Image (tube, rainbow, N blue to C red):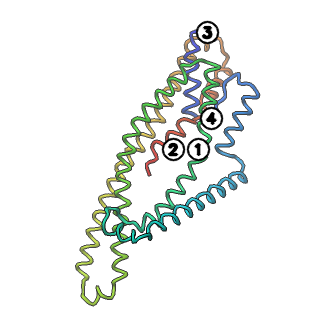
Amino acid sequence: MRQNSRPFLALSLFNSFVFGGERFIICDLTFQGDLLADALHSLKAPKNDKALGVQNMVVGQLSLILREILTKNLQSLYFKRKNYYVVNTLTDLDNPDQRLTQDINLACDLLTNIIVSITVNPTLVVFYTYLCVQKAGWLGPVSAYILFIIFAIISRFVASWSSRASFERQKQEGNFRFVHTKLRCSVESAAFLDLSESLNAISTNSFNRLFHAVRVFINRNAVVFYLTQLNAYCGGVVNYVALGIILFNGPIRTMSASEITVLISQVNRHQIIRYVYTNFSFRCC
């Protein structure tokens, strides 16, 4: 391959690793490197059903342990020195019962589900960056990281914007549920006083606030989804543009049809950084 095509090869190889397919392999990757790539990839997403079952069991048990620790500690603080009265009457905290019963569970499940990705993906990124630099230079990694940083900055603002809508939705869901729970606890007195119309008005107003919050959340979530797809699309475009530059810059004149096919298939394979990005930047709720 000609010397002046090496930067474009770096760009294509690294962007294919960032934005495409299943497993990144450089054409002349050694056998030992291939084994290491397979080992690292198997840690992230085990193919064997039995290993996947064990992983799910460990994640579930870890989530249960975290929930036990958080729930018991928060409840001990909640019932200490009449803090439950202060929290429910003198603070702006909405639906403390929901925070203790549901939100802790959701937070533990989310945390344990991303632990594997958080621990394994940085190792994969460093490993494949090293391979690409060793084989084709710095241009590919630098260009891919620049594209990643641009979308990460965008996602920082979009994620915060969408998270506020998600919070408001959960708040109004709790308020609407609380209205009906309160009615259930005082159903006899409400029936004795014939408060049907008043209760209907209160419930309708609460639902209207919930309806507006859900509609805002859906609209903002659609923007997040669009930006996520745009990220993937831009990565694919950069990948194939770089590949076209490589092919038409010289090597295509000396390569056979089978060699060109192999090159195209090998530069369309792994998506570690985009996986991390879409799972930790655009996952707002």
Q: Residue at x 35, y 46 (%)?
A: 161
Query: Which of label 2 and label 1 is nearer to you?
Result: 1
**Label 3 Cα neighbours within 10 Å, binned few <14 / some 14-19 / many ≥20:** few
The label on residue 2 is 3
**Label 2 Cα neighbours within 10 Å, binned few <14 / some 14-19 / many ≥20:** few
Give the answer, above or below, for where 54 lies relative to 196: above
SS label for mark 2: helix
Q: Which residue is tagged 1?
A: 117
Give the answer, above or below, for where 167 lies relative to 254: below
The quadrant holding residue 158 is: top left
Mark pair 2, 3: CA separation: 38 Å
Q: Residue at x 38, y 54 (%)?
A: 166
Q: Is the C-beta separation of discs 2 and 1 under 8 Å?
A: yes
Mark 3 or mark 4: which comes first in sequence? 3
Mark pair 3, 4: CA separation: 29 Å
Mark pair 4, 1: CA separation: 10 Å
Query: Which of label 3 and label 4 is nearer to you?
Result: 4
Mark pair 4, 2: CA separation: 15 Å
Mark 2 or mark 3: which comes first in sequence? 3
Mark 4 or mark 1: which comes first in sequence? 1
Mark pair 3, 1: CA separation: 38 Å
The quadrant holding residue 152 is: top left
- How many labels, in total? 4
Give the side of residue 212 with respect to residue 26, left or right.
Answer: left
Q: Which residue is tagged 2?
A: 279
Q: Quadrant of the N terminus?
A: top right
Looking at the picture, tell me which residue is in the foreground, 241 or 150: 150
**Label 4 Cα neighbours within 10 Å, binned few <14 / some 14-19 / many ≥20:** some
